[in-house]
Each structure stands twice: as C-alpha cells, then as structure tokens.
Amino acid sequence: MRSSLSLFLLSASCFSAAAALGGLPSKIYGVNLGSWLVLESWMLPQEWLDMGGQQCADCSTCIATEFAFAQAYPDTVDKIFDGHWNSWFNQPDVDALVHAGINTVRIPLGYWIVEALVNRTTEFYPRGGLAQLRRGLQQLHKAGIVAILDHHALPGVQTAGQMFTGRCTSDVEFYTEFNYHRALIWTAVMTTLSHVDPDFAAAVSIEAVNEPIMNADQTPGYGDFQMNFVKVVRATEFLLGVPTPGFGAMPAPADGNFTAMLPHVSDDNIFNAEVRSVLIETVPILLQLEIKGLSLRKEPLVTTFSDVNWQFNNPPNPAAAAIGSQLYDNHLYYSFGGVADANPDAYMTSICNLNRVQNDAAVGNSPLVFGEWGLPTQFNATDEFLNMWADAQKLAYSQGAGWMFWNFKVEKSELAGNLSRQWSYLEGIELGYFLKDPTQVHDPHVCDPYVINSTTTA
Ligand SMILES: *[C@@H]1O[C@H](CO)[C@@H](O)[C@H](O)[C@H]1NC(C)=O
Ligand SMILES: *[C@@H]1O[C@H](CO)[C@@H](O)[C@H](O)[C@H]1NC(C)=O
Ligand SMILES: *[C@@H]1O[C@H](CO)[C@@H](O)[C@H](O)[C@H]1NC(C)=O
Ligand SMILES: *[C@@H]1O[C@H](CO)[C@@H](O)[C@H](O)[C@H]1NC(C)=O
Ligand SMILES: *[C@@H]1O[C@H](CO)[C@@H](O)[C@H](O)[C@H]1NC(C)=O
C-alpha cells in the first residue's frame, strides 16, 4: 500500500477545485442538520423546556443534554425524542433546502444510534434514532442531496463541557483503546449500511470525529485511531465488493459475511488485528439491524477528518491515514473569540485574508471544506454588516471544497429571541443575508478594501 498511498498524497496536493471527490459535489454548498439526531438544547430552548428539559449556565448541572434527559426520564425518553426527530427535520425542511439550492448536508450523529454499543448500566441515551436517520436519508436522496455521516458525539465523550457530545461532563474518556474500538465498530456499521441498505443511498462520506480536543497532548492514540478509521472503512468496503482502486482483487465471494471472509484476506497492513476484531464484532450488530436489501453498491466512501490544524502540540496528520478519497474539515466561528478583534473591520480583514485553504494544502489536507461556520458576532451586527459578513465568508470558504453552515435552522420563539438571525441558514435567506442561490453573493468585491495587498497577486 505504501506506494499507492504516496501517489495519492501527490495527486491530492495537485487537487483541482473543479474535480468532484467521490460522491460529493465538486463544490459543497451545504448546511448542518444540527440538533436533529444529536440535540443541543441551546438551539431550541422552548421546545426543550416543553419536552421536560432544563436550562442552566453550566450544562453539566441540570437536564441540558440527551444523557441527562434519558437518565431523568427512562420510561418516556424514546417517545419524546421520536417526536422531536419527526418535527425538527422532515419533508418541509428538505423542500426548503432544495429551494435554497443546498447540495450537501452534514448529519451530526451520536455513537448511541448504534444501540448495541451503549452500556445501559452507565450510559443513557434515547433509542430509535436509526429508523429516523433512514427516513431522513431517503427524503434527502429523493431530493438529490447527499449526506456526510458525521460522528459528532463519540463513545466516552470527546471534549469537556459541551452539549454537542450528548453528555456535558468534564470526564472525557474517548481517547482510550476501549472507546476507539467502539467508534471503529460504529464506523464499520455505518460503512456497511451506506453500501448495502437502499435507505442509505444519500450517504457518501463518514466523518471520523467531530472536534476532538485541540491540545494533541491530551489525545493519546488519536493518530493510530485515524489510521484504523480509514482501514476499517476500506476493509469493510473490500469485503462488500467495493474495493478502492489499487486495493487488489477480491479473494472471496462478496457475500457480506465478514466472519467467513476474513481468513482469506492476507493483507495484514489493512486487516490488522484491531481491524479484524472490529469487523468480527460488527457482524452480530448488522444481523440485528434488519437491513432491507443487499443490492445497493456505490463508489467508495469519502473519509472525512477534522483537519490537522484543528489541533496544536504536534498533532497527527490525517493525510497520513488516507487510502482513497479523503476530505478535511475546518470549523470557524468568530463569536467565541480568539480569531479577530470584536469589531466589524477586524472581522472583515481577518476573513478577507484567510489562508487556511492554502496552509492546509501545504500539509496535504486538501480538499478542505468549512464544515461549520455561522454569522454570529461578538458585537451587535447591523443588517448591512451581515450581508457583507455572509458574502465574505462564502467567498473565503469557496476557495476550498465549499462550506456547510451551522445550522440549517434554530428555534424561533420568544425565549430564543434573536437566535435565528445569525445561526439559521433558512432565516438568513428570509432576512436577505444569503441570496437564494448559494453560489451567488451580493457583492463579489466585498473583500477588495480589506485585502492586504503586499503578499499575493492571486
Ligand atoms: C457496563 O458497565 C459496567 C460498569 O462499568 C460494567 O461492570 C459492565 O461490565 C459493562 N457491561 C458491558 C457489557 O460491557
Ligand atoms: C458466516 O460465516 C461463519 C463462518 O463460516 C458461519 O459460522 C456463520 O454461520 C456465517 N453467518 C451467516 C449469517 O451466514
Ligand atoms: C447589543 O444590544 C443589546 C440590546 O439592545 C444590548 O443589551 C447589548 O448590550 C448589546 N451588546 C453589545 C455588545 O453592544
Ligand atoms: C434583535 O435584532 C434586531 C435587528 O434585527 C435588533 O433591532 C434588536 O436590538 C436585537 N435584539 C437583541 C436583544 O439583540
Ligand atoms: C488593496 O488594494 C485595493 C485596490 O488598489 C485598495 O482598494 C485597498 O484599499 C487596498 N487594501 C488595503 C488593506 O490597503
């Protein structure tokens, strides 16, 4: 594999922005389906209270997450969440996304959607999400929108004090052999479903881990996990008869029985002991899932990682893990501080001189998508500024593989106040910050006064 891997890295660095990557569009104009299958209560404060949740300043101290909710309401949690899943994202939302020209969605998912991975004595999450995911993916596929399955909330929790991990806690346990292993089983299940379950036709990519801890000193083993993540995807595909080019010929009939096929596989690099053990443990889980068909097979999935620059202190480079098509994901929010001074001119100067696409390409992290961004600001933004701010961000992110806004919508209610103005893509269209055609901006020259002229001519 070594020679084909380095060949890929070579071709990745010459990547032309016009070439499509796997089943993804050549330019991603996307939104996140946040708070659907991983609920973040800050995005729907009134509905959350109506469901029986609570609001508090420190989300670890009240019923602010799925985990706390499921622990508090063990008998009714599944039914209450099913109601949320049905109402938060359904056909009218798909229609609105089609109308808005959206071609890709990123779907945040918890490990608990593969229910066999949950230890119910210590871990509490709603059940029934997979049926909803199937329903949503079917609707998206009919609408011609492709999906990135984003492992957003990892077993053991990947970062402290966040609602988006499903459990708000300082007890971060993801970076352990046990939880890496569970995440890999999740990956093998999702890879299989993506290739054999007709309901999963829209799924073209899996993202390994949403927003790992930024300090790489605190994520031991994460580089090996990245390698095994790609190997699990490619090994699963190989056994399903969807080999990545350069992988070699199928040694056994592609009947999907990993247990029967593994002894015939001799590549100990891809099929290392951990990958084999993951595949063997995946089989009984798949058998429980009542997959409706075994007919669907499409081109290999795109593996997606948070880019290397998401972390500091000598992080592992996910480019080293690539076998076949791979996408890199950067997230950029100005409202949390640390990016630019809290005023409109500083924001514009920063975004108009952003060099993340180029810097990432220099270390093999290309193509780069901006998988989360928004309009929120640390100051009260005028409508005029938000028009410019939307334009400038879209122009900056389109230099790479494109963008996915956070979020497709948030709640509109008295309690939510102005939340939707800067966090909702669909509301942003209503308010005129986004044009109806996502490929267009109000002013393609919005950055001209802010570009620092000395460095480049391009
Ligand atoms: C579930 O967690 C409990 C408590 O840590 C442990 O004793 C038990 O062995 C676990 N069960 C499984 C099936 O792993
Ligand atoms: C898969 O293969 C193993 C080993 O040959 C066999 O024991 C098992 O019954 C097979 N499973 C199915 C579902 O066919
Ligand atoms: C923004 O406006 C609100 C309401 O008018 C006000 O309470 C708040 O202090 C303002 N924030 C800033 C940073 O100016
Ligand atoms: C909400 O947004 C409007 C402009 O759309 C603004 O007039 C108002 O002050 C904002 N309220 C708060 C609390 O920021
Ligand atoms: C860069 O050059 C353009 C065109 O000459 C000019 O309008 C703009 O003000 C300059 N930008 C800066 C930051 O000096």
Image (spheres, rainbow, N blue to C red):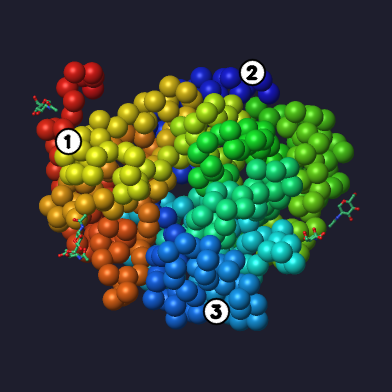
The mark total stands at: 3
Identify the residue position indicated by label 1 in the image. 447
User: Which amino acid lies under the numbered mark 2 shown in the image of this protein?
Assistant: Ser
Residue lying at 33% horizontally and 44% vertically, measured from the top left: 337
Q: Going by the image, does 210 lie left or right of 374?
A: right
Calculate the distance from the C-alpha at mark 2 to the C-alpha at mark 3. Answer: 52 Å
Q: Amino acid at mark 1?
A: Cys
- Mark 1 burial class by Cα count in 10 Å: few <14, some 14-19, many 20+: many
Crowdedness of circle 3 by 10 Å Cα count: few (<14), some, many (20+)? some
Q: Can residue 395 be seen in the rendering of this structure?
A: no
| Residue highlighted by disc 3 | 80
Q: Secondary structure at mark 3?
A: helix
Nearer mark to the viewer, of 1 and 2: 1
Q: Amino acid at mark 3?
A: Ile
Residue 118 in picture, x, y percent from top left: 71, 61
Please give the residue where the numbered disc 2 appears in the rendered image: 3
Residue drawn at (19%, 55%) of the image: 380
The quadrant where residue 275 appears: top right
Q: Secondary structure at mark 2?
A: helix
416 vs 314, left or right, is left
The picture places residue 169, in percent across and down from the top left corner, at 57, 57
Ligand 5 is within 8 Å of the C-beta of the residue at disc 1? no
Q: Give the mark nearer the N terminus: 3 vs 1.
A: 3
Do the CB atoms of the residues marked 1 and 2 lie less than 8 Å apart?
Answer: no
Task: Between residue 316 and residue 61, name the one nearer to us.
Answer: 61
SS for dot 1? loop
**Residue that appears at 19% across and 18% down:** 454
**217 or 22, which is in the foreground?**
217
Q: Give the percent coordinates (x, y) of residue 436.
A: 23, 56
Observer-nearest residue: 289 or 223? 223
Q: Is residue 165 left or right of residue 345?
A: right
The residues tagged by marks 3 and 1 sit, at their Cα atoms, a distance apart of 47 Å
